[in-house]
Image: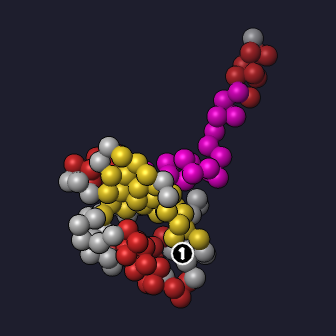
Amino acid sequence: MRAAIAALVLVSGQSLACGYCVEDKIAATYDHAVVTHALARKHHVAFFHVDGAVKSPRALEQAAYSVPAVDRRTVRVSADLLTVSFAFDSSRATLGAIRSRIEKRLAAKHVSLMPFEVMEGQEIWKP
């Protein structure tokens, strides 16, 4: 019986998130309510890797919210996994324009964003 429990513990330990793969990084900022609400409004949801030293998740949030196309109360930041996500209205700005504006706002902190995934309706695209 103890051997079976030990084997189960070992196997379950292998299924833990590594924190390095794209899926784990996306999961760190995924919010089902944000996604469903955004897609119902025909908005998009973008997930980015944050390259650079992020000392305050609040700075990332403020930079994202400085872009009018980013939907309010949708920015999610994982400082541990260096990931940020948000919903946005693509009729107001392109993802490239949003990314540029956020990076410009964070230029003094030497932060850049690399897109992982964008959800648009039933489609998901990965750059």
Q: Residue at x 58, y 59 (%)?
A: 81
Residue nearer the viewer, 2 or 99: 99
Residue nearer the viewer, 92 or 48: 92
Residue nearer the viewer, 57 or 109: 109
Q: Is residue 16 magenta?
A: yes
Q: Give the x, y percent position of residue 53.
A: 61, 75
The colour scheme used to paint the residues is secondary structure
Residue numbers of the magenta segment: 11-31
Q: Residue at x 72, y 19 (%)?
A: 5
Residue ID for mark 1: 112
For residue 46, which quarter of the picture?
Answer: bottom left
Q: Give the x, y percent position of residue 39.
A: 27, 50
Residue type beneath disc 1 = Ser
Q: Residue at x 49, y 48 (%)?
A: 27
Could you say whether the residue bearing mark 1 is in a helix, strand or loop? strand
Q: Give the x, y percent position of residue 38.
A: 27, 54
